[in-house]
Image: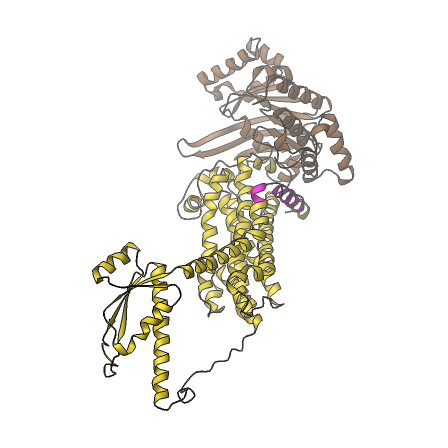
Amino acid sequence: MNARDIWILYRMEIRSAFRERSIVVNSILMPIFLYPVLLWVTFSAMTFIQGLNEQFTSRVALVGDLPSEHRAILDSLEARDKVQVIRGLGRDEAVSLIRAGELDVLLSFLPPDSGGASLPGNFRVQALYDRSEARGQNAVARVREVVDDYRTRWIGQEAEARGMTEQDRRLFWVADEDISTETDLGNRVLGLLIPLFLTIMVALGCFFPAVDTTAGERERSTWETLMTTSASRGSLVTAKYLYVATMGVSAGILNVVAIVVSIGAVMAPILGETEGINFRLPLLAIPVMFVGAMVLALLLSAGMVILASFARTFKDGQAMVQPVYFAAIVFPLLLGQQTDITLSPGIAAVPVANVAMMIRDAINGVFLWPYMVESLVLDLLLVYLCLRLARFILRFEDFLIGSYSGSFWRFARERMGFRSSKKDLA
Amino acid sequence: MTTNGRTVFVEDLRKTFYDESRGEVKAVDGVTFSCHPGEVFGLLGANGAGKTTTLRMLSTVLKPTGGTASVMGHDVVREPESVRESLGFYSASTALFPRLTGRETLRFFARINHYPVEGLAERVEALISRFGIQEYANARIEKLSTGMKQKVSIARTIAHDPPVLIFDEPTVGLDVLNALEMVKVIRELRDEGKTIIFSSHIMSEVEKLCDRIAIIHRGRLLALGTLESLREATGEHYLEDVFVHYVTRAEGLEVAAIGATGELEEAP
C-alpha cells in the first residue's frame, strides 16, 4: 500500500461524492436539517393533537339515581366546561351509541360494593366507555376529575363540621425535593436523542457512499478502470473504505451539532414556558461522541463496503446493505427505552450498542472508563477482522472483476470453509 | 526498460476458469508472443476467443494460471504495480468517472500512475490541446457526448505517457467517424514509438492498422505474422479468408496438430 496513492484516490472519491445528489442529501443535508425538523414537526404535532382533544366536548350519559345528599355532584358535572350531560338513555341504547362514536361515556351511580358501605348516601360511579377512542378516555378523565374534586370538598366539609381544620387533616405525606439542575434535565433528554440519531446518521452517512463506491462503480464500469491504474489493490480498497467512513463520521457529527444547536427550539412545543431545562453538553462528552462516531463509522462502513461490493448494480447494493443499516439502529433504539441502565461489561461486548451507551453515559456525565476501553477495543478488533475478511475476499479474481454473481452469504458458504469448491481456480 | 528490444513478452501464458455449467474452462491456453516499440500488434479473434482474458492478464487484472508475461521487463505476477505504471489500458469496460471533469480526469490518471508532479500541469494541458477537448475540459464527463468521452478516454489512457498501450475492442459502440478517429490516434501513437496491442474481431480495422497479427481461437494462437506472411502461408488475400482458413483448420484438425507456435515463427 502506498499512502500517496491512497490520498489521491481518497480525494477523488470525496470530490465525486460531493457532486452526487443522493450522497449530498443523505450524508450532509439530512443530518443537518431532517432530524431537527422531524423532531420539531413531531413535537408540534403532538401538542396540536393534544390541543384538539381538549377542544372536544365530552358527551356523558347518566343512568340511575344519586342519593339526595350528593345531588351537588351533578351540578358540578353540568357546570364543568366541555362536558355535555345527557339523560334519559337506557343502558343498551347508551352502549350502542358509544360503539357508534356518538356518546363518550355512560355513568351509573351504584351503591358501594365493599368498604364505605356504612357511610350513608355513599356511592360509586361506574364509567362505561371505549378505551380505544381518545374521546372516551378524555371523558372518563374529566368525570374522574369532577368526582375527585367533589370527594375532597365533601371530606373537607365533614371534617370541619367535626372541628378539624385543613392543617389538622394534613398527616403522613411525602414532601419531595428535586436536586437535579436544569442542565441535568437537558442532558437526560439529549442522552435519549443523541445516541439514537448519531447511530442512524452514521449508518445513513455510510450507506450511500458504500453502495456508490462499490456497486455503483461496477454499474458505471469504472471499477476496472481503477483496477488498471498503478495503485495497488490494498490502496484502492483502503481509500474507498476511508472515504465511506469519513462520510459516516461527518454525517454523525453534523447531526449531533444540528440537534444540540436546535434542541431548545425543537422541544419548545412540548416544554412550553414553564419547564426549566437547559441543553448544555458536558465538555468531556464531546470527544467521547467524536471517538464514538469514528468507531461507529469504521465499523459500519467496513460491513457495508464488504456487503455492497458483491453487488453489480446500485439497486442490488442497496438491498444487500440494508440489513446492516437496520441491525445498526436496533440496539440504540431498544436501549433508548431503558433510561436506568449504564454501560456494563455485557453491553460493552455488543458492537454499536456499546458505543451508543458510552455516548449516553458521557452526556449524562457518567464516564465508566474500563468499560469504555473494552467497548472501543472490541469494536476496533471487529473492524480489523472485517478488513482481514476484505483482504481475503480480494484474493478471488472473479469477485475482483465482477463476474462473481452471488451475495456475500453465498460467497461465505462456498469459499470460507463452509463448503469446498473449485471456484478459486478463477 | 525493454528485454532484447521487446516491450511485451508473453510465453506459454495460460488461464483456467471454473464455470458452474461447463466446469474447467481453458480461456487462454499456452499463448506466446512478444511486441516491440513502434509496433501495432493485433490480436484477432471471435468473441470468447481469449483476447480480453490475455489482455487482462497483461494488465494484471487477472493472474495467469501458468506461463509468464512481462511488460517493460516487469513480471505481471511479481511486479503488478510496475506493469500497470508502464501501460495504458483502454476498453469498453473501462469507463470514465462521470462526476469528474475532463481536466480532473486527466490529472487524476496522470497522478495515480505516478507521472512526475513537476510536469503534471503541462502534461494535462498538452493532452487537452492534442485531443481538442479545450471547450469541454471543465465539463463533467456525464454531460459529454460519446465522441467527446472517447477523446477524454484516450487522453486518460496515455495521461502518464506509458510506453505500452492496450486497446481492447476500442471501436465497439462507436459510430464510423469516431471509429476512424480512434484508428487515426492509434497510428499517431505508434509513430511516436509506443507499443500498441490492439484487439478486435473487426477484420478491416486489423488489416488497416496492425503491423503484425495474431489469430487467437479457443484460447490458443493459431497464427502470428505480418498480413503479407499470413497471406502467403494460406494463399488467401483477404484477412477474413485468412482468419477463416486458420479457424476451420483448427476446428477440423485440433490445434495441437497444427503446431501453432512453430508455424508462427515461420511466418516473419
Q: Choose top left, top right, bottom left or bottom right for residue A75.
A: bottom left
Q: Which chain is yellow?
A: A
Q: Which percent across, then down, holds residue A103?
A: 30, 59
* Residue range highlighted in magenta: A7-23
Q: Choose top left, top right, bottom left or bottom right for residue B68.
A: top right
The answer to whether A406 appears left or right of B103 in the picture is: left
The answer to whether B183 appears left or right of B30 in the picture is: right
The residue that appears at 45% across and 37% down in the rendered structure is A405
Looking at the image, what colour scheme do you see? Answer: by chain
Q: Which percent across, then down, holds residue B241?
A: 53, 11
Q: Is residue A375 above or below residue A179?
A: above
The residue that appears at 57% across and 44% down in the rendered structure is A23
Q: Which percent across, then down, holds residue A417?
A: 42, 48
Q: Is residue B1 above or below residue B196?
A: below
Magenta stretch, main secondary structure, is helix
The residue that appears at 63% across and 24% down in the rendered structure is B147
Residue A12: within the magenta? Answer: yes
Q: Colour of chain B?
A: brown
Q: Nearer the viewer, residue B263 or B50?
A: B50
Numbered disc total: 0
Q: Nearer the viewer, residue B76 or A24?
A: A24
Q: Nearer the viewer, residue A110 or B149?
A: A110
Q: Is residue B251 above or below residue A168?
A: above
